[in-house]
Image (cartoon, grey):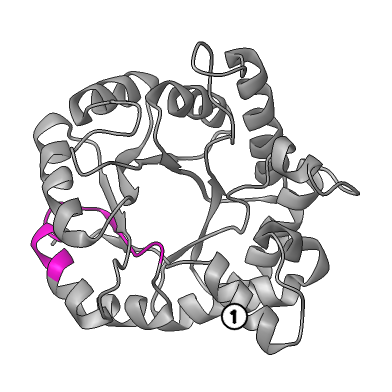
Amino acid sequence: MKQSAILLDGATGTRLWELAEAAGLERKSVWTYNLEQPELVAQVAKEYIEAGSRMICTNTFAANAIEVSHIGGTTSPEVVAAGVRAARSAVAGTDVKIALDLGPLPMLLEPYGDLTPERAEAMFAEQLESGAAVGVDCIFLETFSHLEMMCIAAKAAKRCGVPVLCAMSFEKTGRTLMGDSVADIAAALEEIGVDAVGLNCSFGPELAVPVIREFAAHTRLPLILKPNAAGIGKDAFADAIAPALDLVSYVGACCGSGPDFIRTLAGRL
């Protein structure tokens, strides 16, 4: 394992819903809690910090202009800024880093859909600039399944002046949903000048580790591994992810995980 490996967090949305339901609150789009229940957002981050996370993601994954407009009454910059503030309150007094978290836009780019590259860039820039203005340590672009959209987001992120981490979502074929290969992803993102590449979400660690090995064969950039829990327990998850720990610089867990998964990974690291 690389001694510089940073332990990331686990799933945020599902844990937020658990806390909201326990408090008798309505289950909503997770980004709405940044404005309505910021203390719950900070609590989730604190749980991961206590479990061993050295970098936490802001609760801003889907807080883009399209998603926010579906509910109304606020704007994407307001939601993103509130999410960063909640994260900052959680890390206060620690050396834990904050990653401004962005996911793909919920539309397909032309010619597959109606989204133009110019509009996509503008929406990503809106999220990125509003989050970076509050203060973050890096940007984490995750769960992208279309390399072209990732490149648009990455170029906008590079203008913020902080490190940019990029993680793609893969199918069992070893390519993204849009057919992008590891080799093409590595080459394109290296050219943009991002600071790390890899995989998140997608599937469990057993299928994710071979993809990471392929990344290692195609790039010298630091690698990210944040696969789904895949319905397995925390110990089995840690066992399955162990073969890749000598390759990656960032490791964590995605859908289906919780603080116990991160605590177990911390023990292994």
Which residue is found at the position 35% from the left and 27% from the top? 178
- Residue 267 visible within the image: no
Q: Is residue 141 visible?
A: yes
222 vs 241, nearest the viewer: 241
Left/right placement of residue 30 relative to residue 137 reads right
In the depicted structure, whether residue 183 falls above or below residue 133: above
Q: Position of residue 249 (x, y in %)?
A: 25, 53
The picture places residue 153, in percent across and down from the top left corner, at: 52, 29
- Quarter occupied by residue 14: bottom right
Residue sitting at the far top: 111
Q: Secondary structure at mark 1?
A: helix
Q: Does 216 lie within the magenta span?
A: no
- Whole-percent x and y of residue 28? 72, 65
Disc 1 target residue: 18
Q: Amino acid at mark 1?
A: Glu
Question: Residue 158: image x %, image y %?
Answer: 51, 28
- The magenta stretch spans which residues? 240-255
Q: Classify 149 as above or below 20.
A: above
